[in-house]
Image (spheres, helix red, strand yellow):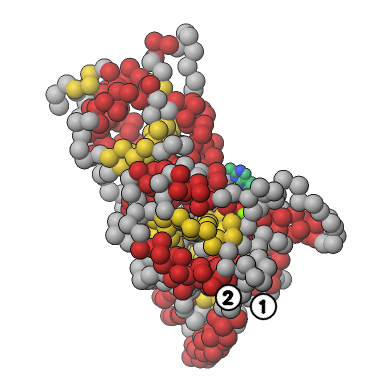
Amino acid sequence: MSNRPGRDALLEILCAEDVRYIFGNPGTTEGAIMHALEGCPDLEYVLVAQEGVAMGMADGYARETGKPAFVNLHIETGLSNGLSLLVNAFAGGTPLVLTSVNSDMSKVAEGRTDLVDLTRPFTKWGAEVTHADHLSAVMRRAFRVAKTPPTGPTYVSIAQNALDESTSASVIPSGELNTRISADAELVASAASLLVKANHPVLLVGDRVAQYGAVDAAVAFAEQIGAEVYGASYPAMMFPTTHDQWVGLLPPYVPFYRDALAKADVVVAVGARVFHDFFRAATDVLPEGAKLIQLDINQDELSRTEVADVGVWADLGLGLSDLRTAALEQYTPEQQAAVAGRIQQLSDSASDRRRASVATPQSGSSGGPMPVSSMMTGIADALPQHVIVVDDSVSSRMDLHAAVAFDENRCVHAERAGGAIGWGMGAALGVSLGAPGRPVIAVVGDGSAMMTVQALWTAATYRIPIVYVICNNASYRVLKVNLKRWFGEVLGDPDTRSRYLGMDFANPFDFASIARSFGVPAERVDDASEVAAAVRRALAVEGPALVDVVIDGGV
Ligand SMILES: Cc1ncc(C[n+]2csc(CCOP(=O)(O)OP(=O)(O)O)c2C)c(N)n1
Ligand SMILES: [Mg+2]
């Protein structure tokens, strides 16, 4: 390989890794990269005005494309701004490679920050490149580790001198990785022997079912065993919510789990956190005598808090299909008839469940504040075919789920884990870049939107066609909801009175004005009957648009 500066080698590496976008905000140390990019038409730099936007964008892009995203944030200062959403990417297992250009190695005595150390708690792996010759191998490892299950973010700090020095090191991409690990046959057989005896099996699906492409296998498995299906979360379309066996998404509070699982005798948790609660470690959730079968590609999730009777570490699609086959072999004709009976019952009750969840639009300007359910019904009415919903609706999520069905036609990416707010504004940008031509509607809480509202500038500048719909409840409503639950569940006094200090916005944000100031057309809606029309008008705009929906923030 001929000699070239490290900065050119870095761009070669990114092209070899099939990177299309660099999400970032540069500093002086990044000057060399920005200069080299002028000669590299295959890579597009997408500038953000706040680093959290780049992190959200990378997260959305990686989720939509399934490929590792690439981010560059400036040294300790810019990098620190991105840490909050790195927490989410790490907790949610998003494959991305985060980089910064650190000071020159000649500054060791003067003082340099250990940037790898700064990111360590929230990355799978990190290293610093101190010489141009090491760039290729270190970046290859970073991409490889990011996309190896359990996937997640990696970090590379590049000393400034490594971009200026020459290197003749060859670029070898990280390549495809086959991680279709089969389940252990003995474990599968013992899981199947529990399954066939179950009178009330429950399937609990988690985000990795979608992430690892196991949705069809989950549906086939549920149909085979006649299980009720719940979502431990719903960060992507991981089970069609239009399916008769889908019962619903469980909010992350133990009482909801206990209620949903009260009759279960076998719970099969697939690619899911078992279990998660806002307040305490969620142990002892299962009813007395119920068996827990866990299947996950992420070994760390097996028996994490609730000990599994059978824990299977395998590719989710392969594991589900092996379990299904093993159960099929063991069923007696009576057990098969019982499966058919359960499916019939679930299908008979499905339309009632759906009807119960659909709200009639009420409100607005004349009749008090608009209920969130009415806002979501309006959005549902306006959703086009093949839309992707980016759900960062926080405390409005259950209403969104009640109103909108998700399947192959209407997909979703939702804030997944980690808990940092500010995810959705940037994530929508990344999702849209990863799915050109598809309509994207981002439903975002006002508090979350305000954390990374600079995303509107990037949307306008790059003309990224997203419809942002803001749940403007003038509050950090979920904090009020959680305080109320804490009064009841932890203090044992649900009637405790509170002024909800620091949770209401005495001066609500005017998102329509903010959006217009960034060059994004926007309107404000406070009447439920106007929501659908406003969303349709926004969808008709070429480029981004925003609808600021004023809703009730009470609890
Ligand atoms: C970066 C960050 N800061 C603060 C918090 C604490 N927090 C969690 S949820 C939340 C409020 C979210 O408000 P909003 O987006 O308006 O949704 P709502 O609760 O009103 O539905 C806050 C402040 C957090 N999780 N992350
Ligand atoms: Mg709010």
Whole-angstrom CA distance, mark 2 to mark 1, is 34 Å
Q: Is residue 125 left or right of residue 435?
A: right
Which residue ends up furthest to the front in the rendered image? 366
Mark linked to residue 361:
2
Q: Amino acid at mark 1?
A: Lys
Relative height, residue 128 to residue 365 (above, below): above
Mark linked to residue 263:
1
Residue 362, image x, y percentages: 61, 74
Q: Amino acid at mark 2?
A: Pro
Q: What SS does tag 2 mark?
A: loop
Foreground label between 2 and 1? 2
Q: In the image, what residue occupies the spot 41% across and 50% down?
A: 520
Which residue ends up furthest to the left in the rendered image? 2
Front one among 102 and 388: 388
Disc 2: CA contacts within 10 A as few (<14), some (14-19) or many (>=20) = some
The C terminus, quarter of image: bottom right
Relative height, residue 366 to residue 155 (above, below): below
The answer to whether residue 281 shows anywhere in this view is: no
Q: In the image, what residue occupies the spot 56% across and 50% down?
A: 510
Ligand 2 falls in which quarter? bottom right
Residue 190, image x, y percentages: 52, 70
Q: Is mark 2 within 8 Å of ligand 1?
A: no
Counting residues from the start of the chain, the first of labels 2 and 1 encountered is 1
